[in-house]
Amino acid sequence: MKNYTGEELSEALRAINSIIHKCEKAQEKFPEGKPQHTLLRNRLKAMYLSKELITEELSKIGPSAVPQTSAQQTRAHAAAAQTSAKQTRAPQTSAEDNCSSALLLSNLDQLQTTDLGMERIRKNLNLDTDDVVLWCREKIKAPNAIVTRKGKNWYIAADGCEITVNARSFTIITAHKRTI
């Protein structure tokens, strides 16, 4: 691979994330089996692969070679953690779910919620923590977490609770105790 700077790779990663989002949104409009759906599915596979390669390259650069923001360092660490976590996670239902979980794990630093969301999550789970987002991040990164994508949301099942995250804005919508 040509020697790109960390800044160039980060810029490419932002563009790829944008393309992925647009393709996912467009793919929902076409029924499976139609040429447009197949084209978008193939394009998404290529974009997920590109994203993974760039994320891997960014993690190789490291903080000593190129000054990185803490967000870039977090993404690089999340990618490394995601690689080791893949070996211990329960099998996913499809290749699309794997790509989606990788996308979520590589963007954990963007995770957020609203004040009402924090209040709702604290109430639903009887939490006594001020940083609900950090608590949710830790649950999502847990080795036993199962990440699935349904429509516009990710659903993360871990340690007896289920967390719902909007796939576009990385906003934690809610979390509640799982009923078995």
Image (cartoon, rainbow, N blue to C red):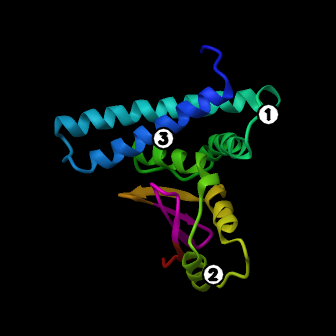
Q: Is residue 36 left or right of residue 119?
A: left
Identify the residue under disc 2. Answer: 122
Q: Position of residue 103 (x, y in %)?
A: 52, 46
Q: Quadrant of the N terminus?
A: top right
Query: What's drawn in magenta, residue-wise?
Result: 154-173
Q: Residue furthest left?
A: 34
Q: Which mark is residue 7?
A: none
Q: Looking at the picture, which amino acid does disc 1 mark?
A: Pro
Q: Is residue 60 left or right of residue 103?
A: right
Q: Looking at the picture, which amino acid does disc 3 mark?
A: Asn
Identify the residue under disc 1. Answer: 63
Identify the residue under disc 3. Answer: 17
Q: Residue furthest top?
A: 2
Label 3 and label 1: CA atoms lie apart by 22 Å
- Element marked by disc 2: helix
Give the class, few, some or many, for how many residues have Cα within 10 Å of label 3's Cα (few <14, many ≥20): some
Which comes before the other along the chain, label 3 or label 1?
3
Q: Position of residue 94 (x, y in %)?
A: 40, 46
What residue is shown at x 68% (from left), y 39% (from top)? 76
Which comes before the other along the chain, label 2 or label 3?
3
- Element marked by disc 3: helix
Majority SS type along the magenta span:
strand
Name the image quarter holding residue 62. top right
